[in-house]
Image: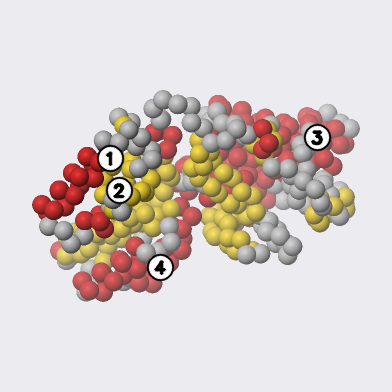
Amino acid sequence: MFLCSAYSAQVFTVDELTAYIDASPLGGIPFRFTQKTTVGISATQLTLDVVAKHHSEYHHHHNIDEVLDYAHKSDWSQNQKDIYIAIFSILADAEARVHGISPDLIHFHEVGGLDSIFDVAAASFIIDRLGDSNWFYHPLPLSVGTINMSHGEYPAFAPAVRLLLHGFEFAPGVNSGECITPTGAAILSYLKPDTINNWHGGTLRYSGSGMGTRERKDRPNVLFLDLFEIDKGGIADYNQLAEYIQEICFEVDDMTGEALSLALETLRKSLGVLDVVSYSVLGKKARIATSVRILVESTSVEALSRRCFDVTSTIGLRLRGLSRLVLLRKMDTIEDLPVKIIERPSGITVKPESDALSGLSFRDSEMLTSKIKTMFYGKEDRNNV
């Protein structure tokens, strides 16, 4: 769920996570992100096929040394390795206290499968990517009832989870079944987040929602992750405002201009689409073709890919992850005309929205643009247009 919420919040692209996983013994495990709705909430869910690629290892229970070897034998950065090792060491220490043995004798069961190892590896990648961030949490849900484990039926939470969550605040009320897994508890314990009551505010940049595999009828099994930027004064660091998006590319040479125009307009209006560009190219067999490039939010790429196949004649798409730097901007009005106010490293600029200039001659358009800029730059308080 942590992985899915971070992907939904555009912390990384599929290509970046794939390269990271492939740089370790976990390489080759098929995975994909999809959107799913449960109890009225849509969120990102991970499909991980560890059986298909590592069938012999899937049900193998690893000891702590075997688990840590996934980091030792990887080409990850040292910080990524350190995070991975720290999370599993925290978990091993809790399990050792539960069983009354030394951590080096721990034999992981549920958290020793490749799916849990993949989760911790991905969490290490995310935590490293977010760098020197401050973490905060809302009070946690309290579990009641029982859960089935390799050792038998236990009261919820699992024994190790109870130890890992010492010192954390819990919300009023109780919830049936397992609300926090040992892996999730170990990640929380590593992050040492502060309570939300001690948060001093910031600007919300990205929000993500990650769905677990367990279906619940009483409430959505979803983790929400919000990324805030704290205003430290001075010039903004625009390198920190990167967006991780996807690009869909394809060519068509067997659609009429009218049909393709309608199709591209349909795609342009689709959920998550940021931009659609098309241009003429010389295709195979010297045929004139139209090349299409679509920029789309990562969480919408699968749905949009299906739509591309439905509304155009293409039979193949090229997908790749991209990062782009964006400037902070806001919409406002000057003299009832819509304008876009943009924060640049050198200062604030303004320009009229293109719709405001529709139907004007070039001369009138230039005069109106000049008038808007003069009015804007002449104001003492440009933040209150």
| Residue type beneath disc 2 | Ile
What residue do we see at 50% from left, 35% from top?
A: 229
| Residue type beneath disc 3 | His
What residue do we see at 46% from left, 63% from top?
A: 303
Q: CA distance from mark 4 to mark 1?
A: 42 Å
- Of callouts 3 and 4, which one flags the residue occurring earlier in the amino acid sequence? 3
- Circle 4 SS class: helix
Q: CA distance from mark 1 to mark 2?
A: 8 Å
- Of callouts 1 and 3, which one flags the residue occurring earlier in the amino acid sequence? 3
Numbered tag placed on residue 334 in the rendering? 2
The location of residue 49, given as percent across then percent down, is 60, 55
Q: Quadrant of residue 325?
A: top left
Numbered tag placed on residue 37 in the rendering? none
Q: Quadrant of residue 73?
A: top right
Please indicate whether residue 51 sits to the left or right of residue 76 in the image. Answer: right
- Of callouts 2 and 3, which one flags the residue occurring earlier in the amino acid sequence? 3
| Residue type beneath disc 4 | Arg
- Circle 1 SS class: helix
Q: Where's the C terminus, which quadrant?
A: top left
Q: Are discs 3 and 4 less than 8 Å apart at CB?
A: no
- Circle 2 SS class: strand
| Residue 12 versus residue 177 in the image, above or below | above
**Disc nearest the viewer among 1 and 3:** 1
Q: Are discs 1 and 2 less than 8 Å apart at CB?
A: yes
**Disc nearest the viewer among 2 and 3:** 2
Q: CA distance from mark 4 to mark 2?
A: 39 Å
Q: Quadrant of residue 135?
A: top right
Q: CA distance from mark 2 to mark 3?
A: 55 Å
The location of residue 337, given as percent across then percent down, is 29, 53
Q: Which residue is mark 4?
A: 307
Q: Residue furthest left?
A: 363
Q: Which residue is mark 3?
A: 166
